[in-house]
């Protein structure tokens, strides 16, 4: 399962984001705090086994409507990849808030058009 999880973090849209993050991080001087505090974000990865057929990158590409939640700051601490942390299985913190917002939008009529 871990291998499939890593695949979702490193391919497709998340792979493109990783390349962008690398360029951003490398643009800072080694002594700059931003280099070690940079927080990566992107498509939230769910802990699913490959046998389920679920791939966050493929789901993003085939979605008719795409909604992105942009967080002002890291949910906690700094200098890590937030994609696994904000998964919808988290029932507290930013994961809970995002889940509530997403469910609210999904249940609205204007989203069904």
Image (cartoon, helix red, strand yellow):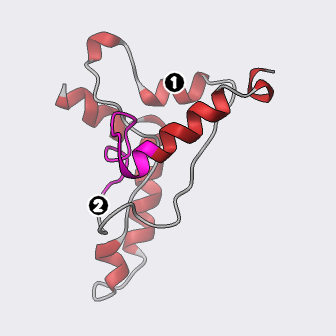
Residue 66 on the magenta segment: no
Image quadrant for the C terminus? top right
Q: Position of residue 74 (x, y in %)?
A: 40, 64
The CA distance from mark 1 to mark 2 is: 24 Å
Residue at image location 58% in from the left, 41% down from the top: 101
Q: Position of residue 70 (x, y in %)?
A: 56, 55
Residue at image location 33% in from the left, 64% down from the top: 76
Q: Which residues, given as a range, are shown in magenta?
A: 81-96
Residue indicated by mark 2: 80
Q: What is the number of the mark on residue 91?
A: none
Q: Residue furthest left?
A: 2
Residue at image location 59% in from the left, 45% down from the top: 68
From the viewer's perspective, is residue 107 above or below residue 21? above
Q: Quadrant of residue 9?
A: top left
Q: Give the side of residue 27 with respect to residue 106, left or right.
A: left
Using a 10 Å C-alpha cutoff, classify the residue at mark 1 as few (fewer than 14 neighbours), some (14 to 19) or many (20 or more).
few
Residue indicated by mark 1: 59
Residue 83 on the magenta segment: yes
If you read the primary sequence from the N terminus, does the residue marked by circle 1 or circle 2 appear first? 1
């Amino acid at each position: 399962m871990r291998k499939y999880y890593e695949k979702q973090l490193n391919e497709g849209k998340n792979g493109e984001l990783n390349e962008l993050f690398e360029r951003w991080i490398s643009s800072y001087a080694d002594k700059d705090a931003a280099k070690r505090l940079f927080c990566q974000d992107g498509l939230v990865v769910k802990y699913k086994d490959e046998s389920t057929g679920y791939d966050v990158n493929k789901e993003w590409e085939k979605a008719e409507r795409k909604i992105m939640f942009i967080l002002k700051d890291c949910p906690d601490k700094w200098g890590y990849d937030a994609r696994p942390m904000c998964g919808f299985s988290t029932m507290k913190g930013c994961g809970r808030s995002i889940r509530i917002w997403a469910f609210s939008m999904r249940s609205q009529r204007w989203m069904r058009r």
